[in-house]
Amino acid sequence: MTGTPQLAPTWRLWLVWGVSVAAYIVSVTNRTSLAAVGSDAAVRFDADASTLSMFAVIQLFVYGGMQIPVGLLLDRFGARPIMTAGMVLMASGQLVMALSTDVGTAIIARVLLGAGDAAIFPSALRVVATWFPQQRAPLMVQMTGIIGQTGQLLALLPMAALLHATSWTVAFGSLAGLGVLFTILTFAIVRNHPPSSDADVSVNTATGAIAVVRSSADLRQGFRESWGHPGTRLAFWSHFTTPFAGTAFVMLWGFPFLTAGEGLTPAVASLVMSAFVVFSMLVGPVMGALSSRHPLRRSRMLVLPTIAFQALVWLAVIAWPGPAPLWLLFLLAFALATGGPASMIAFDHARTHNPSHRLSTATGIVNGGGFIAGLIAIFLIGLAMDLQGAGTPDTYTLEAFRIAFLTQVPLWVLGAAFIVVERHRTRVRMGIDPPRKRRKTGSAEPTEPSDG
């Protein structure tokens, strides 16, 4: 560093962030591009439910697996080159998808898409960390996530309308062209840090404190240290448990469930799916404000209630005799929409409990959690459909979907249990709660945890 870094001009700050967020919108559009055209994909590739699930599962598997490498690369090279490379990979993946006519080629396309997608959101978070004051970072992280989710709207009616008005090749080729455009924009406009800095730093304008974001000297040690802190594990399980139901719903299985299962028209089903995105954008600022005001109660007040709300509403839809009423399906969309904003709290945990030099590594660990859960949920739903003999669009039934969506329950239970455990360990590490006392016989005597 050479001197104290100054804040970038307002116009440049918002331009860099705006292009980063726009790139994230494009990545979300690419990620959910099969949301409303899953049945078309099943016909094009002659795919059953398990094979259709594999398209999303492989994409998310690559996404989750790439989070740690992306975090390490961000520590070394910064946001600009990693975001640009991600856009190149996504454009390549959609071009391959546009030209593919068999399952094998389509899987290659989804691998490229997942690898490119993995680079965008962590890069956008790095832009927030280096361009905005530290005290504004939590709000800007929430805003980045909220605005980025509008990409799902582009993957619903517009994508389906374009495909049905033209062809598979034109629709996915258009997404490839959009990727090329944003490859150019990110390379031309996004910068790792403001021009007044010569390194990635995070500045607290209230105190003048400067934290340098630098590469870890020992990458393996950086990973061990990040995962070794209970706050990182709390963040991982929070991000594992809160968004996966919404991911499975909006990425692949929501539209077929609403149309073939619940009997809605494609237009009404798209309205419900669009409501999911709008609800998410409305809930995000509220969740972010509550998280900032109650940093010691985030898990108990926000994360765990979100998980319980999603599970209860899903079970109500599943248990409803016959097709669920439209108001309940909109309530389901609202419940699932809370998962994305709640998952953003995990990044607050990662930022709070990790020093700046391993922040990207911790962020990668946390970001992988939700998508690992998402791929598990998508695969289990598809497998359950096939095992019931309802693996193709012409055999989908409401009862089959109900049983298939029950496979989400163990994931909620598992994640919630680990959140409770790691929350206590984190509070003990922070000195808020006392450690569990040991009896002379060696048995643990539980103590009543504080609300903080």
Image: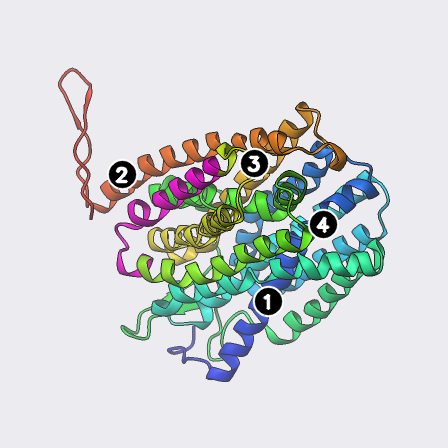
Q: CA distance from mark 1 to mark 3?
A: 33 Å
Residue type, label 1: Arg
Q: CA distance from mark 2 to mark 3?
A: 27 Å
Q: Earlier in the sequence, mark 2 or mark 3?
A: 3
Residue type, label 2: His
> SS of the residue at dot 4?
helix
| Residue at image location 52% in from the left, 65% down from the top | 147
The image position of residue 329, as x and y in percent, is 52, 47
Q: Earlier in the sequence, mark 2 or mark 1?
A: 1
Callout in the foreground (4, 1): 4
Residue type, label 3: Ala
Q: Magenta span covers which residues?
A: 291-316
The image position of residue 146, as x and y in percent, is 49, 62
Residue type, label 4: Leu
Q: CA distance from mark 4 to mark 1?
A: 19 Å
| Residue at image location 19% in from the left, 35% down from the top | 435
Instruction: Please tell me the numbered disc located at residue 424.
Output: 2
The image position of residue 233, as x and y in percent, is 39, 41
Q: CA distance from mark 2 to mark 1?
A: 38 Å
- From the image, tell me which residue sits under label 4: 112
- Judge whether residue 293 is colored magenta: yes
- From the image, tell me which residue sits under label 3: 377
| Residue at image location 35% in from the left, 44% down from the top | 305
